[in-house]
Amino acid sequence: MKSIVLLFCVFAFAAALPYDPVLRKLDEGPRYQHVEGPDGTLHLEDLWVKASNLAEAARYNPDRQNIYHLYTRQNPTVSQPMLIGNEGLLGLNNYNPARRTIILLHGWRADATTDFNRVLVPAFLSAEDVNVIVVDWSAGAGSINYATAVANTVPSGESVARFIDWLNTASGAIPSMYHIVGHSIGAHKAGIVGRNLGGRIGYITALEAAFPGWITHDDKFRSNDGAYTEVIHTNAGVLGYVTPLGHVDFYPNGGINMPGCNSQECDHARSYFYLAESLTSGGFTGRRCASYLTAMTGNCFLLGNLRMGGLVPKTGQSGIFWLETRSSPPFSRG
């Protein structure tokens, strides 16, 4: 009799738990995979999309919640706000449509103050007199649930495209004057932005485009998302995407296990440190490879070299490239 009562209690407790059905799998791989958070630590995340993930994503309104921070050489450390539809602010801040405009898109559980932005904002401003717009989409990317952040990436990218379209209309700026840079899930978002602007953005850089949740994703980064697209792989097959995605894909040190790093998180972050250095020093010469497999092993002997990163898009170039770096700054070997 006691066992029957106990069994009844177990069933009653289970029935009282909230029902959260699984709607789809993000990937065909393991359900739980490690993803890097903004603090540099790995988090074991559920990559099966549940009803609660979509319910949380539905509460995110990127047109209202995305925040745009403008930095220029006139205000290199304290940002100025930009609001879609508010043309009055354009006459009050330091935005100049005659300059090139850099759009920075952070990754999961990050925001305007994380290392990705702290490294790249001063690097771009040091290298050229540009407008740098940091997009804080932490309202969408900041969910503790990685699957929710992935779901929010697409509508947020569409919203940034609307912002750029408005800015161009209001100021006379043109798509070819833009350079969009994204890290991790922000890299896929960069592609979504460019795609929603008809592939007319002059230069898009995907830094360590996220691997978990994006292998079979319909909206992952594509080579034709911009006039010139470049991908830098530094933790390929773990936190970062392994196969080529852009017009040009670079695999420094084989795309994984960066010199000077002792963790996957460090490898994942190296991509934006390499880009920052390329803006100011121009180094990092890659050797052409026959495939990404030969790039990952360093067996690249085809004719033709290409500089990684830098300020100017290498429009018309394509291929896969390998290079070596040092373990500490300056990372470039020339």
Image: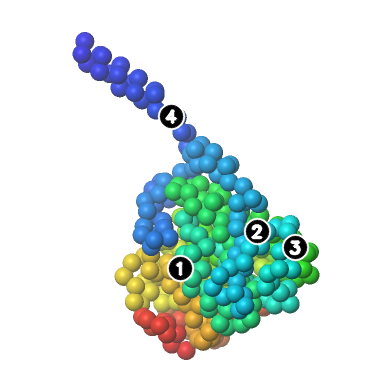
Q: Which mark is residue 115?
A: 1
Query: What's the residue type where badge 3 is placed?
Result: Gly
Query: What's the residue type where badge 4 is placed?
Result: Pro
| Sequence-first disc among 4 and 2 | 4
| Sequence-first disc among 4 and 1 | 4
Q: How many marks?
A: 4
Residue holding disc 2: 160
Residue holding disc 4: 18
Residue holding disc 3: 88
| Sequence-first disc among 3 and 4 | 4
In the shown orientation, is residue 276 left or right of residue 64? left
| Sequence-first disc among 1 and 2 | 1
Q: Position of residue 80 (x, y in %)?
A: 62, 67
Residue shown at the point (59%, 74%) measured from the top left: 75
Measure the C-alpha gap from mark 4 to mark 2. Answer: 35 Å
Q: Please rate how many residues cluster around mark 2, counting C-alpha atoms within 10 Å: few if below 14, some from 14 to 19, many from 20.
A: many
Q: Is residue 239 above or below residue 30?
A: below
Q: Position of residue 245 (x, y in %)?
A: 56, 66
Q: Where is residue 74, by image quadrant? A: bottom right
